[in-house]
Image (cartoon, grey):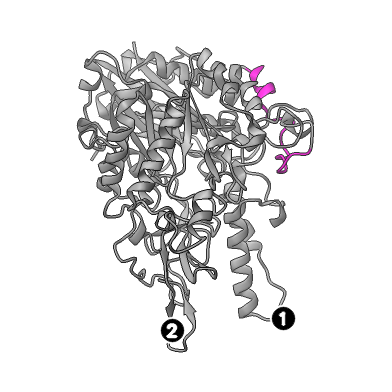
Amino acid sequence: MPHTTSIATLLSEPGLPWWKTAVIYQIYPISFFDSNGDGIGDLNGITSKLDYLKDLGVDVLWLSPIYRSPLADMGYDMTLILDMAPSRIGMPSLAGAHERGMKLMMDLVVNHSSDEHDWFVQSRSDKSHPKRDWYIWHPPKYDAAGSRQPPNNWKAVFQGSAWEYDAHTNEYYLHLYLPKQPDLNWDNPQVRGAVWKLMKFWLDRGCDGFRMDVINLLSKADGLPDAPITVPGDEFQHASIHFANGPRVHEYIKEMSDKVLSKYDVATVGETPFTHDAEELAAYVLPKNKELNMVFQFEFMDLDSAFEGQDCVPLIHKDWKLTDLKDVVTRWQTFKRSEGFWNANFTENHDHSRSVSRFGNDSDKWRALSAKMLAMMQVTQGGTQFVYQGQELGLKNFPRTWGIEEYKDVASQNYWHKILAKRKEESPGVEIDTSDILDDFAKKARDHARVPMQWSAAPHAGFTTGTPWMRVNEDYENWNAESQGHDADSVRTFWKDLLRIRKENSLLIAGSFEELHHDHPQVFAWVRRLNGQLALTVLNFSSEEARLELDCHGLPLSTLKLEIGSYHKKGEVSYINGALQLQGYECRLYLSK
C-alpha cells in the first residue's frame, strides 16, 4: 500500500519558520580552506568562500567544532567551549555571513569534554573537589582473584572499555567515546547551569542555532547496569540500551528549552545515534513537547552497515536493497506530519563516507549522473535540507589503494588495531591479512568525508599552499569547484538549480508524500501535493534502462511539466503513453503547470 499524508495546513498559515525552508551547509573547518598556508583549514578560509556558498543557495552555515581542543577526536573534545581555537581566528571573521543574509549554526558538544578541560582537571584532582561530581566517577569492582575491574562491561564507541582508571583517586571515570572525552554528569544541576551559560554566550554573539552532538546520550540508566551479552567472547559489550535515550534525557532538554532556547529565534537539530525507533525520536521533535526542532535519525545512513545485536557497526559494510531504502525514506516522510514532526534531510556528513560511493555509482561513467540522482532524492523530500561540504560537487571516497596510514580518524585506527591484535592472538607467528578491513574502510570510513575540499586543479586541490594535514583525493584535477562552476552540466550546477527550484516551490518543502511502485526493482518515485499543486520525482537507481508505468495512479499527466532532469531539458515531453522510459541513473522532477 502506498504511504501518504496530508499536511496542507502547514502552509495555510502565513509563512513557515525560517529554519524549515533553510538550506544548511555543514563545514568541517579543518578541511574546508586554509588561508595561511599551514595546511589546516581556518575561519578566514571560510570567510573567503562565503560568496561561493551564497551562490550555491546556502542559507545557514553549520560549523563543526571550532573551539579550543587537543583534537583527539578532531574537535569533538573541547578544552574550552567559550573560546575559539587559536588557529581559527574569531567570530568577527564570520560577520560576512550575516551581511550576506546567511545565518550561523554552531556545534554544541556537551555530553562530554576533553580530559584537558579545566572542569575535568579539577574533577580528577581530588575526590572532595567541588567539581568531582561534574563527571561520572565510580570505584572499581574486583573479581574473584582480587584483580581490579571497571564498574561495568560497557564498550566504548571507539573500542575498549567505556571506563578509564585514574590511579590518583583510585576510581574510574565514564567515557562513552575516547578516554580523552570524559562524560559530563548531567544529573548535576551545576553542570546543566554551566551549559546554559555557554549556550547564551554564543547566542548573544550572533549564533543562530545549534547542532547538538549525541544529545540523546545525556542521561544514563540508573545504577549503570551491565550490558547484555550480544557478542559472546568479547570482554566489553555494546551498551546503548543503557545510555541512549535515558530516563531523564527529555527532562534535561525541556529544561534547556525553557532556560535558553525559548528566549531566542534559533534552529536546533539533535544528533540521535543508536536509535531507529520513530516514536522514541518523535518525543524530541513534536512541538507539543517543547524540546528540539529536528533530529538527525540514522536509519537511512545505517542501511549499508552491519549490526551486532541492536548496535550498528558503522565500519563494516553490508549490501543494501532499494526496497529497504524506499521503506526508510517513505516512513520518515510520512511520519506524524499532522502532529508537526519535521525532518532533517541529509545523505552526507562528517561521520559518513561519500553518498555517491555508497548509494550511487562512482565509476567514471556514472558518477555525475548518480550524484545528480542522489541530489534530487534529497532535495525533493520534505523537510530542512542539510548539505555537507563537497557533496554539491559529487565528491567520492578516496581510492582503495590507500593504506591504513592514510586513515587519520581515531575510529578507523582503533578498529583496525583491535582486529589486528585479535588476529595476531588467534594466529601467532603468521602474517596477518587485513585486506578485508581495508575493503570495508574503502566503503565506510569517516575519513572519506574529511579529506580536504577540492577547490581547483591547483596543487593540493587549491585547499592550501602548504602541506595539507590530510592527503587530498587524487581526482581533484578533474573534480573541483572551479571547473564545475564553469560547466552548465556539472553536479554543482545541478545542485544549485535544485535548491533554487525548492525555494520557488513550497510543496517541495511541506507538501504531502505518496510513494509510487514500491516493488519496482530499479526506480524510486513519489508524488508531493500541496494546495492543488503536484510534484513528481522519479529516480532510476541502476545503470540499466527502466520503465515506469504512471497511468495506473491516475496522475494528471497532461498537466505535468519537466522542471529539471539529468538527461532531458526543462519543458521537454518525456513520457509516452502514460509511461516513463528512463536511462541509467536518470532523475526527473515534474511540476504541475
Q: Is residue 25 above or below residue 189?
A: above
Label 1 SS: loop
Q: Is residue 312 magenta-colored?
A: no
Image coordinates for residue 587, horizontal then vertical, percent: 47, 28
Q: Quadrant of the C terminus?
A: top left
Q: Quadrant of the N terminus?
A: top left
Label 2 SS: loop
Q: Is residue 480 magenta-colored?
A: yes
Which of the two residues, 233 or 365, is positioned nearer the viewer here? 233
Which of the two residues, 164 or 61, is positioned nearer the viewer here? 164
Q: Earlier in the sequence, mark 1 or mark 2?
A: 2
Give residue 161's mark.
Answer: none
- How packed mark 2 is, by other alpha carbons closer than 10 Å (few <14, some 14-19, many 20 or more), is few
Image coordinates for residue 393, horizontal then vertical, percent: 60, 29
In three-dimensional space, the C-alpha distance between marks 1 and 2, rounded to whole angstroms, equals 32 Å
Give residue 429's mark.
Answer: 1
In the image: residue 347, left or right of residue 399: left
Q: Quadrant of residue 132?
A: bottom left
Q: Is residue 347 above or below residue 462?
A: below
Identify the magenta region.
Answer: 467-487
Q: Quadrant of residue 292?
A: top left
Q: Main secondary structure of the magenta part?
A: loop
> Which residue is pictured at 47% across the width and 76% down the height?
149
Q: Is residue 220 above or below residue 249?
A: below
Residue type at numbered disc 2:
Asp
| Residue position for label 2 | 143
Residue 264 in view: yes
Residue type at numbered disc 1:
Gly
In the image: residue 86, left or right of residue 560: right
> Which residue is pictured at 39% across the width and 63% down the height?
239
> Which residue is pictured at 32% across the width and 48% down the height?
189
Image coordinates for residue 451, horizontal then vertical, percent: 65, 41
